[in-house]
Amino acid sequence: MPRRVAPADRWINARDRPLARARHRHASATNRSRESAEFRDKFSFARGGQRTALPSRVQLRYTVRMLQSRTDVVVRKPQSGDAEALAELFASSWRLAYSGIIPHLHLEGTIRRRNVEWWRGVANRGDGMLVLEVNGTVAGYTTFGRARSKGRFQGEIYELYVTPTHQGLGFGEHLFEAARHALDMRRLAGLIVWALSENDQACHFYWRRGGRPIARLFDTLGESKVERVAFAWR
């Protein structure tokens, strides 16, 4: 009668198991490095006639974090009382994301225009907006709706921002998935998101969520030009 052979990993000697686990961790790290390299190789843009890839040290904040249900997180519709927190959130997240990318005067002018009263009006309308609340504190928001340009991607996430103190903790996924669900409920097929190409953190976030660049364009802000890239999901 032929002898039954067990899988090889069952015969690993007890003293060799730490080495096997170390090899597994090394292989996992190597795969993540390859994914990052793939991102840098594919996500590059023409600037000034030259093809420039993203910096090699892009922060991989969302590489292995899974979207999970959390009791301290609530994604809900906005309320009038959120206006002050939203104004502060917008100012801090924009200064962090766009200082040195958007001209200073334009950046600060946009922040001034989106004051508490402006946000109160947006919150009162409520449609096409969700707020992220963490332990009772407004920590992020997203706006979404029908895509502003005609094409095969019918839904669009217009904005998605999280306060600097809550970034890198997985809260962005909660907002992103909630917005996608809301767009699905509206039966809008396909999704598009525009981000500034120099905003490495945002571009990498959308790449890790499965978006791929499909178009780019330039906006003129004063005497400067900034490049936007469109990420799309089918």
Image: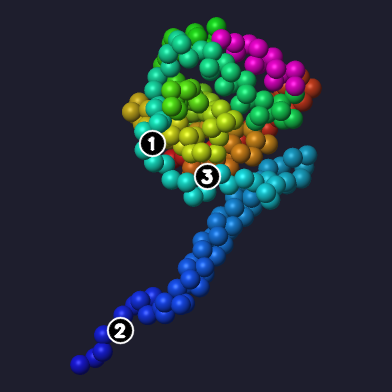
Q: Nearer the viewer, residue 37 or 1?
A: 1
**Residue plotted at (39% across, 41% down):** 68
**Where is 42 relative to 141, above or below?**
below
Q: Position of residue 70 (x, y in %)?
A: 38, 36
Can you identify the residue that label 2 sits on? 5
What secondary structure is the magenta-colored segment mainly? helix
**Residue plotted at (65% across, 16% down):** 110
Can you identify the residue that label 1 sits on? 70
Q: Position of residue 196 (x, y in %)?
A: 64, 32
Secondary structure beneath label 3: loop
Tell me the distance, in whole angstroms, between the alpha carbons under discs 3 and 2: 40 Å
* Chain part drawn in magenta: 104-116
**Amino acid under label 3?**
Tyr
Q: Which mark is residue 62?
A: 3
Task: Answer with mark 2 or mark 1, whichever residue precedes in sequence.
Answer: 2
Task: Answer with mark 1 or mark 3, whichever residue precedes in sequence.
Answer: 3
